[in-house]
Image (tube, coloured by chain):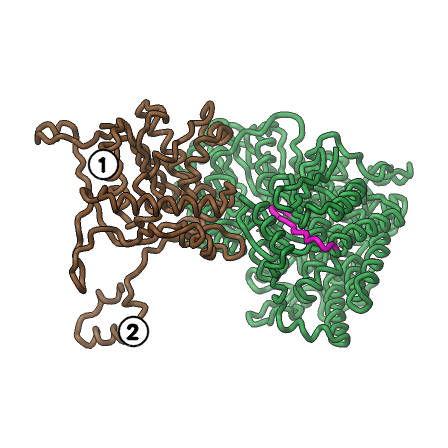
Amino acid sequence: MRSLTLKKRGDGVAVLLFDTPKRPVNVLSGQMLEEAGPLMKEIQDDDEIVACVLVSGKPDSFIAGADLDEVVGMAAEDAEAISRGAHEWLDLVEKSRKPFVAAIHGVALGGGLEVALACHYRIASDHPKTVLALPEVMLGVLPAAGGTQRLPRLIGLQRALPMLLTGKRVRAAQAYRHGLVDALTSPGGLVETAAKAALGLANGTLKPNRDKQPFTEKPLALPPLRAYALGKARDEVMKKTRGLYPAPLEILACVEKGLADGMEAGQEEEAVRFGRLVGSEGSKNLIRLFDAMTALKKAPKGDPPRPVKRLGVLGAGLMGEGIAAVSMGLGPVVLKDVSDEGLSRATKNLRRGLDRRVRSGGLTRLDRDRQWYGLRPTTRSADLAGCDLVIEAVFEDLELKRKVLAEIEGIIGPDAVFATNTSALPIARIAAKAKRPERVVGMHYFSPVPKMPLLEIVVAEKTAPWAVATARAFGVAQGKTVIVVKDGPGFYTTRILGPFINEAVVLLDEGAAIPALDAALLVFGFPVGPVALLDEVGIDVAAHVSKDLGREFAARGAAPSGTFTQLFDAGYRGRKNGKGFYLYPKDRPSGRAKEVNPEVYSFFGGASREAMVAGDLVDRLALLMVNEAVWCLSEGIVASPRDGDAGAILGLGFPPLRGGPFRYVDAVGAGAIVERMGELAELHGPRFNPAPMLAELARKGKRFYSGRRRPQPAPDPQSRRGMSGAGLSAPA
Amino acid sequence: MIQSQKAKGVLDYVRLLQGLSLKDLVPDTPAIAEFSTGLTMGQSAERLAKGLGLTRREQDTWALKSHQKAATATEAGLYRGQVVPARVPPSFAAIESDNGVRGDTTLGKLSSLPPAFDRSFGTVTAGNSSFLTDGAAACLLMSAEKAEALEVSPLARVVSMSLVAMDPLEELLLGPVLSVPEALDAADAPLGEVGVWEVHEAFAAPALALLKLLADKAYCQERLGRKGALGKIDPKKVNAWGGSLALGHPFGATGARLVTTCVERMEREGAALGVVTTCAAGALGHAMVLAR
Ligand SMILES: NC(=O)c1ccc[n+]([C@@H]2O[C@H](COP(=O)([O-])OP(=O)(O)OC[C@H]3O[C@@H](n4cnc5c(N)ncnc54)[C@H](O)[C@@H]3O)[C@@H](O)[C@H]2O)c1
């Protein structure tokens, strides 16, 4: 079975059809490159062929990128070789006197976009599924098929850098405006249109318009100004990544080299640096995360999910609105709140969100209208009749949650699932008085719901497997990465966050400075520092959680800081009421760093702070989180290290390049971790005692993950994907 | 012009006039952008033509024939019995026939027109699109009992009707493809027995699409859920006196015009069954089976 086939039309156009065997999407691979060589020769030698159209044989997908199974674990030389092979092919395409036209419908990602860039002309379908991006950076590697060279040359440095450095996705309309594609057409007749363009290019009647770069691009042709611009970009990368992620810096180096010394030199740079990145631990961890996300999308064996034809959402607050937003594309949504005001605000925001997506090209007007008319905001509970799944997101109050559950049980059918979005209340307690506790399940979303990739599904003892399967399938359909965890105080994510946040306050009690503490964890790789996080989560919520969890785990020496209560009593709530660890003036210019609220130190023994070693700060916070994660694994709260790692990264921002708490233990070594925790326990108390599972691992010299580099490709073709950037947040 | 309702005194009117520009005095052409998709009819016709791979030549040829047939029919006086002369300023001379018919047009002329909706790669032009025209049409419709009571003899009988809607983004203008089989089924009439077809030519593309798709087995199976193709419509039986491409498309009047022409043709051609079908905004489709 071949990936590439050449078909001659009668009119001088040859259609090069890309259709990777046994895969749902097209991927670039060594084997595919081998096929390309002879076909290129055939195209050049055949006098009947005057032009060529490259098109995908897959539905709604052009080319998804490089074959990850092939790239991962490759030796540096092999990775270099594959990059050079791609360069060779695409140089032939670019230099061909017979024009090549890329006909793009669906995703053109990574290597897929690089192939299109080498063509002489690009036509894209004006369809929401058509998305162009170079997501390599999110996997800790770089576009190694000429992307760092051709993209800035085509659309200019200013528009190319965000794509290269952050993996920014571009839709058809914007791609056309920026000159990334030359023409747009409807998906039907894409090949026909591309063939017309190809003939037009061949006989000189069609001239692409390559004059779409902004005028500010002109001065960047001058080396000193270009160097200045690239220097700025480098500073920005360093600021955002704190130097933890080498890929964006390597990408900048390739761009710079190519613009200074020419395409060939730039591509050579690409190959060498790609080889180096592919083997790096950071990139491996990012790709493992991507793999875990892909695997978690697959339905497990067991009870099949029941169809959710109508969703009910209770509570139109921050969370309820977000849950409705990510569900409207899946069918009718009934959104219920007791407050008409809240309901109006949520409805307005939902409409705005839909309109925004229409403007960006992510949604057709027609689909917007379908979703909009499927939304039913209401203050009457009776309107929830007929819902197959109801997700409640009312205030975090046990009695209230019990009350709404009782009310809803009288309205929905016996087979409908009742899910609660509680952040920490045990599901069993909410369901204690339920008529049918088997259909009560936790669906713990993260704020802001549309942006946060994780959904934690919480299974109480009495929850039935079909209810779990239904909630899980619905979450996957919403685009979430779903981990299924066992009921218990704080479930998984909130539970491992508890000691982490508590320790931050304990450190402040001991005299740590707020900026130093936040900075230390940022350098470790967390996206926000623990103190800033406290303000975001809300000091009231955090105090509540740490007190509850502290009580649960008192026997292990967890010691909730009393300062929490004092802060709460003094009216400190964090960002939401403008009274937190940091100042939130209304007129703070965006981009300016936050300033510490000087008054807050009075709760922590005054303004004079002690210098502490950054490494100690990191260890005390991160190791408590890691240790709690291990406890969760040993208690069966999380089912596997993979779920625990994905949950910590996607839900709490555990540094992705470190692969998650369990990968982190494996990388540092359980022995070293246990030793360090012993020191900390001696200094600061028994809360640092390693979990028995961790101690045992250390004793036996074992790891959480087996030594195998990467799971072998599963026989199921659906399971292997290309480099799609879906859901992965950019490190840069 | 909603403001004019608010104008009260003379001064208000003057102020209102000051705000007017030349543009406001030109009569409004009906907005024909789809409410649901924001695409104009022309853009949708272009999507349709591309999706079905309809060539420029096919569309132009259809348009050419429409003009030629309309010219021949007009010259032969076939429309005389249906057309009421209109007298309008400034001359008030009688207008007795449509002025959009170009019997002398050629394929060469049609193929020289630039694409109107996709300048680079399009195939839909002003020549193979119907033009907006002014006009009115009427036909008298009543129940059988009423006709008996009034002792009038009907020109034709409505056997069945169908009104459908399809996907406004991907299937706009394809309504007839769904409604024709439905109406024929309801009338229990096989396609081959229809002697007269009057098909609205909003563009050449949807008329071509109707013929093409009803003869396409795979499409009829997948989209219409039928066992096989509905059948081939004989193009000679379609719009034998010209269609909307030549006669124009007076909004709101085309349906009655089609029915009138269909009935006249059935009479002259001695056909027992006729079908009238149109596509409409919102991806609607109508079809009606008439019998004599
Ligand atoms: N905010 C977060 O970051 C976050 C994250 C995960 C989970 N949660 C959980 O989600 C839930 C909701 O949180 P939120 O931040 O959206 O709160 P919120 O205060 O923004 O919204 C709560 C809404 O529920 C409504 N409500 C109250 N009683 C109701 C009833 N009987 N029926 C219908 N609606 C009712 C309120 O009018 C309000 O609009 C809580 O359980 C919270 O712990 C919040």
The chain painted brown is B
Residue furthest to the left: B150
| Magenta segment boundaries in residue numbering | A96-107
| Residue B23 sits above or below residue A479 on the image | below
Horizontal side, residue A196 vs residue A608: left or right: left
Q: Which residue is mark 2?
A: B19
Q: Mark 2, residues whose alpha carbon is within 10 Å: few (<14), some, or many (≥20)?
A: few
Measure how far apart labels 2 and 1 are at the Cα level: 50 Å
| Residue A314 sits above or below residue A570 on the image | above
Q: Mark 1, residues whose alpha carbon is within 10 Å: few (<14), some, or many (≥20)?
A: some
The chain painted green is A
**Residue B264 shows which numbered tag?**
1
List x then y, in percent, for residue A239: 74, 65
Picture quarter containing residue B157?
A: top left
Residue displayed at 58% across by 54% down: A172
Relative to the observer, which residue lies in front, B273 or A185?
B273
